[in-house]
Image (cartoon, rainbow, N blue to C red):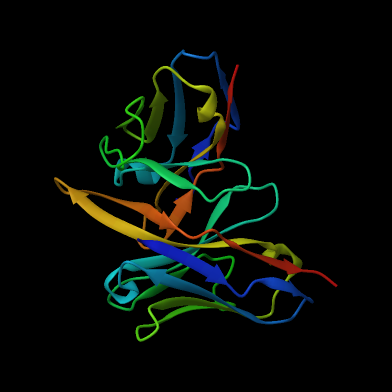
Amino acid sequence: SSELTQDPAVSVALGQTVRITCQGDSLRSYFASWYQQKPGQAPVLVMYGKNNRPSGIPDRFSASGSGNTASLTITGAQAEDEADYYCNSRDTSGNHLVFGGGTKLTVL
Amino acid sequence: EVQLVESGGGLLQPGGSLRLSCAASGFTVSSNHMSWVRQAPGKGLEWVSVIYSGGSTYYADSVKGQFTISRDNSKNTLYLQMNSLRAEDTAVYYCARIHYYDISGYKGNAFDIWGQGTMVTVSS
């Protein structure tokens, strides 16, 4: 299978916690990575692996996974976290890469 | 500074060809796995192609046989040759470096460096 499924939109109140999920068969074999994209900008890697955060990414971002589902959690969402979030992994063959459809996060 | 800069985008008619370039600085393209990702207007990210450090290449089904990924080691530059372009190829094209990793036998990848993107518009 080469599909990763994300909820199209999620909202969170300022300062609260939000979880964005990504489902796909390949996630049983491969870690997901997560990207934040703001309008008119290139995507930015925010989480990868078991729970790895690139330098410069706030520690309110975390990742987890179980079975065919990967999750990105933002603990204490800030206004600047409002963006589109994409998950990514390999497909079940391991040779092709695939992105989820994206989740638009609104911070209320 | 580690950086990727794309160029070569533009407006062209259906059936035309275009070659995108992605110049890298701060690291060596040939020693890394590199990829192209595109984003149609108002749509999500779509993986297009990858070239591994060893030279193997793979393509999304949507562009296989139509696009060719390559690199010039002397120029430290990644390319995407796009032929027989169609309206549905209209998108911002990003190049990105891929970091592959293996944690206790469980593998993953991360696009850790992205270019700013170059717009390709296919229209009559």
Image spot of residue A95 (x, y percent): 36, 63
Image spot of residue B7 (x, y percent): 57, 72
Please name the residue shown 48% across and 43% down the image.
A4
Q: Which image quadrant for residue A72?
A: top left
Please name the residue shown 43% across and 41% down the image.
A24
**From the viewer's perspective, is A54 left or right of A13?**
left
Q: Is residue B66 above or below residue B88?
A: below
Q: Nearer the viewer, residue A61 or A98?
A: A61
**From the viewer's perspective, is A59 left or right of B70?**
left
Q: Which image quadrant for residue B124?
A: bottom right
Q: Is residue B97 above or below residue B17?
A: above
Numbered label tally: 0
Image spot of residue B41 (x, y percent): 70, 52
Q: Residue furthest front?
A: B1
Does residue A2 show up? no
Please name the residue shown 27% across and 38% down the image.
A52
